[in-house]
Image: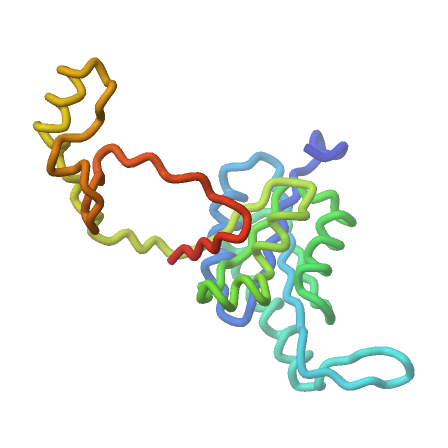
Amino acid sequence: MSPNAESRLVVLAAVGDDDGLVLSTAIGLGRVLPRAELHVLHVVEVPAVVEGGYVWPAAELFVDAQQLVERMTADAAATTGGTVKGHVAVGSASELILRLAGELEADLVVVGSRRKGVVERTLMGSVSERVVRRAQCPVVVARPTTYGVAPAVEPPCPECLETRRESSDERMWCGRHAERHPRARLHYETPEPFALGSTLIRP
């Protein structure tokens, strides 16, 4: 908690062009957190033009960003009835989210999640990942609920259980599962050490 927690609790929502989920998550949190003050931030990153040593976005993008934030703050204020303030910034999204969080002494930051492939995530990272790693307060990553049907867990092999019992755990596998094949040892497999030079790619 920030030093000013007795007088207010600051929630910073970093919204994109279509981040209604981030805003609704922040509003929901604001309703249950006492003395919540909601700040809505939208960062304009590209394209930009250089003028007089300053970097400015194309005029229409800046106007669009201001209108987006004004609309979101109005909706949030009407919903929560509390203090809501809007911010538009130009530059690196993760850097500006972290900077504003520090300036506000935010107690909580809400960011969105852009689902990317493994390679793109590895090469580029993401705003949410960088904010989570570097923030000095709790971060909530808002994402839609997408539960599917979980794969069934197969029961343990009765022969393997019997082999373990008869050998007092000296042998783990029955004859059928002692041989390696694509579906071998699914129930009891201990992952082999992950050595340097190995490559692990998760879906």
Q: Residue at the spot x=91%, y=84% of the render?
A: 52
Q: Residue at the spot x=28%, y=36% of the render?
A: 189
User: Is residue 3 visible in this depiction of the protein?
Assistant: yes
In which image quadrant can residue 35 be found? top right
Which residue is at the front of the view, 38 or 194? Answer: 194
Q: Position of residue 117 (x, y in %)?
A: 44, 66
- 15 to the left or right of 107: left
**How did the renderer colour the structure?**
rainbow
Figure quadrant of the N terminus: top right
Q: Where 175 falls versus 124 (above or below)?
A: above
Q: Position of residue 45 (x, y in %)?
A: 67, 74
Figure quadrant of the C terminus: bottom left
Q: Position of residue 73 (x, y in %)?
A: 59, 61
In which image quadrant can residue 10 be found? top right
Count of number-bearing discs: 0
Q: Residue at the spot x=46%, y=66% of the render?
A: 116
User: Is residue 73 visible in this depiction of the protein?
Assistant: no
Q: Where 156 falls versus 103 (above or below)?
A: above
Which residue is at the front of the view, 199 or 111? Answer: 199
Q: Residue at the spot x=71%, y=53% of the render?
A: 98
Q: Position of residue 84 (x, y in %)?
A: 63, 53
In which image quadrant can residue 178 be found? top left
